[in-house]
Amino acid sequence: MDLVTVKTFDNYFSANIILTRLHAEGVECYLKDETTITIDPILTNAIGGIKLVVKKENARYVKGILQRFEEEYINAATCPKCKAHDFTYLAKPGVTNFLTAILTTLFGSYAVAPEYVYRCGNCNFETERLPDFDNEETD
């Protein structure tokens, strides 16, 4: 049986939520390196994070499900400024991420994670996490 990685995670919370949702969809899947990352999170970048693996013949189907999960998650949030449901997850513009790119290139053995933000496609509102679903976040 050939297994392929369809997604990687940097923490076991997200990995197990997705694993449980896929199991509920009837998909046979597993988490690789979960125990190692849970015991020693510093190794996350060294071993490539927690890997969600599925049978090779199911990979395309599972990627479609994962994309649907992501779209449902992002569309469930409402922008507190304009009330749109149009968030995109992208690298945060600025000096910090620019320096991160340079340092990662120069010191490739030590990976530095860039900062990401959610940006509303309608009004360009940015936030580090999706606004609460009850619209309590206002800045």
Image: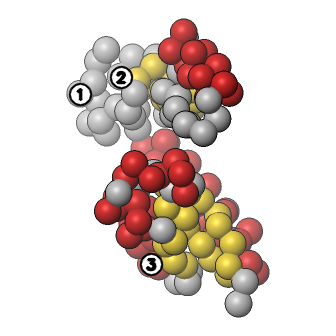
The residue identified by callout 3 is 24
Residues at badges 2 and 1 in contact (C-beta under 8 Å)? yes
Locate the N terminus by quadrant: bottom right
Residue found at x 52% / y 32%:
112
The residue identified by callout 2 is 80
- Count the labels in the image: 3
Q: Amino acid at mark 3?
A: Ala
Quarter of the figure with residue 94: top right
Q: In the picture provided, is 50 more to the left or to the right than 37?
A: right
Q: Amino acid at mark 2?
A: Pro
Mark 3: which secondary structure? helix
Q: Residue 71 appears at what percent x and percent y?
A: 55, 48
Q: Amino acid at mark 1?
A: Glu
Of the image marks 2 and 1, the number of the one nearer the N terminus = 2
Q: Residue 81 appears at what percent x and percent y?
A: 39, 17
Residue 22 makes an appearance in the image: no
Q: Nearer the viewer, mark 3 or mark 2?
A: 3
Q: Is residue 95 above or below residue 7?
A: above
Please rate how many residues cluster around mark 1, counting C-alpha atoms within 10 Å: few if below 14, some from 14 to 19, many from 20.
few
Please rate how many residues cluster around mark 2, counting C-alpha atoms within 10 Å: few if below 14, some from 14 to 19, many from 20.
some
How far is the residue under mark 2 from the one under mark 1?
Answer: 7 Å
The residue identified by callout 1 is 136
